[in-house]
Image (cartoon, helix red, strand yellow):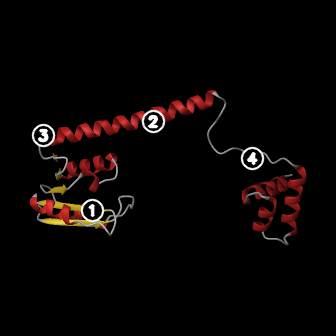
Amino acid sequence: MLIGYARVSTHEQHLDLQIDALKAAGCQKIFTDKISTLKAERKGLDEALAFLRPGDGLVVWKLDRLGRTLKQLIELVALFNQKGIGFKSLKETIDTTTSTGKLVFHVFAALAEFERDIIHERTRAGLEAARARGRSGGRPKIQDTDPKRIALAKSLYTAKDRPVKEICETLHISKSTLYRYVKVERKA
């Protein structure tokens, strides 16, 4: 059984073109969403995935209707392959139930993996270059060693006449810094 999935990004857009194409392709049941792919939850897609059985095929009008990134698409098609479900994209003429369609999709998967590797290499090279220039990653350490400021923070805290939030706002320090000052005092 062919199952269709159609999606538009906004409520102002219409699903008619996609639904007509899916019906012409022989889809017996069609699930729809009117939601951006930026949203994690797509009820129509979830329903379609739950409805699919081994031997069925999921049909979309275009690849971008199914997933936002190539990685998402590859993960979904891999899931379909595991479950014995075919996948067709009408505009790109990809059909994973044929050997040619599998080849085309595997080429896409290889390109996506290549892209991930290139990004990883660039990131690693950038970090190494920064280290060579004496820069290290992470949050910068705050060295507030002004004894007067530390003493003021401690006295305001031990007086217990002001809330911690007010003390922190007054001294422009975080709660963790204030508690670190107090902790040093208690240890001493």
Q: Is residue 164 above or below residue 178?
A: below
Q: Identify the residue shown where x is 23% and y is 66%.
A: 15
Q: Are marks 3 and 1 in contact (CB under 8 Å)?
A: no
The answer to whether residue 55 is left or right of residue 64 is left
Q: Residues within 10 Å of mark 1 (few under 14, many from 20)?
A: many
Dot 3 lies on which element? helix
- Residue that mark 1 sits on: 7
Mark earlier in primary sequence (1, 2): 1
**Is residue 177 found left or right of 122 in the rendered image?**
right
Mark 1 to mark 2: distance in Å? 32 Å
List the single residue furthest toward the bottom.
161
- The answer for how far apart the CA atoms under marks 3 and 2 are is 31 Å
The percent position of residue 59, horizontal first and vertical second, equals 17, 56
Q: Position of residue 170 (x, y in %)?
A: 81, 63
Asked whether the residues under the numbered discs 4 and 3 touch, taking CB atoms below 8 Å apart as contact, a structural biologist would say: no
Q: Residue at x 24, y 49 (%)?
A: 77
Residue kind at label 3, given as amino acid type: Ser
Compare marks 4 and 2 and give the one earlier in the sequence: 2
User: Pointer 2: what residue?
Assistant: 120
Image quarter of the N terminus:
bottom left
- Residue in the image at 14% along x and 59% along y: 21
- Describe residue 152's horizontal placement relative to residue 33 as left or right: right
Q: Quadrant of residue 32?
A: bottom left
Residue that badge 3 annotates: 99
Looking at the image, is 115 positioned above or below residue 25?
A: above
Q: Tag 1: residue type?
A: Arg
User: Residue visible at 23% across and 39% down?
Assistant: 106
> In the depicted view, which residue is nearer to us: 161 or 134?
134
Q: What residue does disc 4 label?
A: 142
Label pair 4/2, CB-CB below 8 angstroms: no
Q: Nearer the viewer, residue 22 or 48?
A: 22
